[in-house]
Image (cartoon, helix red, strand yellow):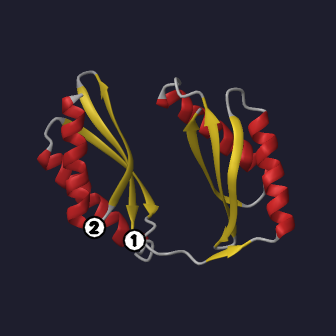
Amino acid sequence: PEEATDLYSATRLAAQEIGVTIHEWWVQSIDETLSLHLHVGVDPNLTLAVAHDRVDQLERMLLERLPQLTTIHSHLEPANADVLPTARVSAGLHRRVVSAVDAAAEAIPHLHDPHDIHVRQVEGRLFITVEALVDGALSLAEAHDLSTQLQEAIRAKVPNVGEALVHLEPR
């Protein structure tokens, strides 16, 4: 665990130095070698070639600074650095989405009381946020699995979803 913490700290620092963000990462150990898997957020206005060069630079820095790493695999994504223009949806669409979210949540055991449901339109896609209650004794991993199930169910029931953000509260 301490070694992983050091890897994460060094990765975060290197990303800051070159102006990218890391929002998900995994360190994997196999046959006594370590590989780092990253989701790297890069300025969306850069060309793919420039963005790729930045991430290559990050990977080189990390391999130099962290000799225990043997490989790094990166997934490039646009970083959200701007305030996104957002529009309200019609009352009818909002009601339909709330109904779909309620139905999706009802089908997931251990997930209760979907509430505080917001529906916005961002860049032509729907951005849905919802809060729900789960047993506070669940592990974070179990709770996250429930939120992922709800996200997937929302996407299956509601067309044109750009993002489904689920915030779970202990009950």
Residue 30 appears left or right of 63 = right
The answer to the question of whether label 1 and label 2 lie on touching residues, with beta carbons closer than 8 A, is: yes
Number of residues whose C-alpha sits closer than 10 Å to that of mark 1, classed few (under 14), some (14–19) or many (20 or more): some
At x 16%, y 35%, the residue is 68
Q: Is residue 144 above or below residue 160?
A: above
Q: Nearer the viewer, residue 1 or 137?
A: 137
* Residue type of the residue flagged with mark 2: Gly
What mark, if any, has residue 19 been given in the picture?
A: 2
Looking at the figure, which quarter contains the N terminus? top left
The answer to which of marks 1 and 2 sits earlier in the sequence is 2
At x 64%, y 73%, the residue is 123
Residue 80: percent from the left, percent from the top?
46, 67
What mark, if any, has residue 43 been given in the picture?
A: 1
Residue 53: percent from the left, percent from the top?
30, 66
Numbered disc 1: secondary structure: loop
Whole-angstrom CA distance, mark 1 to mark 2, is 9 Å
Number of residues whose C-alpha sits closer than 10 Å to that of mark 2, classed few (under 14), some (14–19) or many (20 or more): some
Q: Is residue 11 above or below residue 110?
A: below
Q: Nearer the viewer, residue 2 or 138?
A: 138
